[in-house]
Image (cartoon, helix red, strand yellow):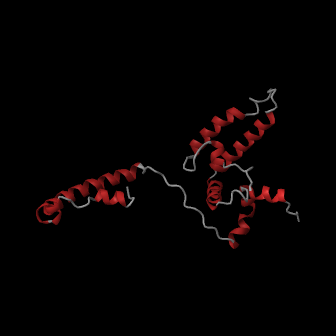
């Protein structure tokens, strides 16, 4: 068994050799496979071994290593099961302590004995078009209902005396983060 020295311990606790794959490709966890492939192609052109074959500055090895890392990142992020595992590993927050490769090797053994509390996955900021369309229909229905109720409130409500009106359904949905 290897002895922990001060250097080993520091290296173990701060593993920065495993860069975030999304950051490496220059994309986000919400990107589709097509977007990830497009980012890979853009970066791969820069570091492809054929493009860096006759360089005099000694960056040929670094470019080749970077190209291999880009390929590995694309392979992981374009495979649904690997991407799901990678996203889960990122949300757990152990990136500095366990590399993704080590996590994958040990995940079948650890799953039964260790329970993680991952962060919530990132959510889309914009609603999909189908959901937005149904939301617009609901809003027009709400407006029709509010027109009928507003006549009643104008006549009999204490709001009429103060000048304040009842909250609309849209405002309520906005305040409850439903829109």
Residue 116 lies, in percent from the top left, at: 64, 68
Question: Could you say which quadrant of the image residue 161 lies in?
Answer: bottom left
58 above or below 14?
Answer: above
Residue at 75% x, 59% y is: 13
Residue 128 lies, in percent from the top left, at: 43, 50
56 above or below 136?
Answer: above
Picture mark count: 0
Residue 127 lies, in percent from the top left, at: 42, 51
Left or right, residue 145 beside residue 30: left
Quarter containing the N terminus:
bottom right
Question: Could you say which quadrant of the image residue 11 lies in?
Answer: bottom right
Of 164 and 69, nearer the camera is 164
Quarter containing the C terminus:
bottom left
Residue at 70% x, 73% y is: 113
Left or right, residue 27 beside residue 162: right
Residue at 68% x, 36% y is: 44
Left or right, residue 79 beside residue 154: right
Left or right, residue 82 beside residue 156: right
Residue at 39% x, 51% y is: 130
Seen from this angle, which residue lies furthest left? 155
């Amino acid at each position: 068994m290897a002895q922990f020295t001060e250097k080993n311990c520091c290296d173990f606790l701060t593993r920065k050799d495993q860069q975030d794959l999304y950051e490496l490709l220059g994309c986000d966890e919400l990107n589709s496979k097509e977007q990830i492939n497009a980012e890979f192609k853009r970066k791969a052109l820069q570091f492809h071994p054929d493009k860096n074959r006759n360089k005099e500055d000694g960056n040929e090895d670094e470019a080749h290593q970077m190209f291999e890392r880009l390929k590995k990142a694309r392979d992981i992020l374009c495979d649904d099961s690997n991407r799901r595992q990678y996203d889960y590993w990122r949300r757990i927050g152990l990136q500095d302590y366990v590399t993704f490769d080590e996590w994958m090797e040990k995940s079948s053994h650890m799953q039964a004995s260790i329970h993680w509390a991952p962060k919530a996955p990132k959510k889309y900021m914009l609603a999909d078009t189908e959901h937005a369309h149904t939301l617009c229909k609901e809003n027009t229905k709400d407006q029709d209902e509010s027109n009928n109720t507003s006549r009643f409130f104008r006549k009999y409500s204490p709001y009429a005396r103060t000048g304040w009106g009842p909250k609309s359904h849209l405002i309520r949905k906005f305040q409850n983060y439903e829109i």
